[in-house]
Amino acid sequence: MSASKPASRPADAAVPLPATLPAVVPYLTLSDTAAAIDFYARAFGATELFRLTGQDGRIGHAEVTIGGSVLMLSDEYPDFGALGPQSIGGSPIKLHLQVADADAALARAVAAGATVVRAAQDQFYGERTALVADPFGYSWFLASRIEDVTPAEMQKRWDAAFAG
């Protein structure tokens, strides 16, 4: 009995996503990925899935989960154009982390070494939200749902908040 050969796929056929990954996954480039993994575990409860370390000690790729979401990480590789926020003067990217208790999440992140950018406040869109900067140049919203607000009601509240 011979082993059957896998069916070939046309060159332009899409390869299905692994069941463990959503369609969009943030990929952060960092100056020290090992330290970032440790920080994200302490600050946000991240669980490391795996890491690939090069012979030079740099992490070429790592994956962690935070609250069921996957975050991909790597050390800087300037020769590939992979530079982190500290090397390029900051990042416009902010990550939004949904948590059960924004105040408790803020306290945990600060204890781990995050810097408060904005203290936790109730927001017009139905969340209590804080903003912290991690030691690696990325900003994180820590948000807990406090009420369900429809998009129409959000717009109404937005207009009222920014009128005049």
Image (cartoon, helix red, strand yellow):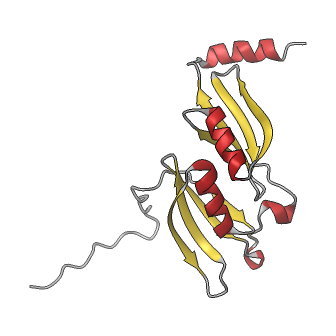
Is 45 placed left or right of 15 in the picture?
right
Looking at the rendering, which quadrant does residue 29 occupy?
bottom right
Q: Residue at x 76, y 59 (%)?
A: 136
Q: Position of residue 160 (x, y in %)?
A: 79, 11
Q: Position of residue 17 (x, y in %)?
A: 43, 58
Q: Is residue 65 above or below residue 141?
A: below
Q: Is residue 40 above or below residue 94?
A: below
Q: Residue at x 66, y 33 (%)?
A: 103
Q: Is residue 94 visible?
A: no
Most foreground residue, 91 or 108:
108
Q: Is residue 21 visible?
A: yes
Quadrant placement of the N terminus: bottom left
Of all residues shown, which one is farthest toward the right? 164
Q: Residue at x 42, y 63 (%)?
A: 15
Most foreground residue, 8 or 72:
72
Q: Residue at x 57, y 67 (%)?
A: 62
Is 40 placed left or right of 5 in the picture?
right
Looking at the rendering, which quadrant does residue 34 occupy?
bottom right
Most foreground residue, 47 or 29:
47
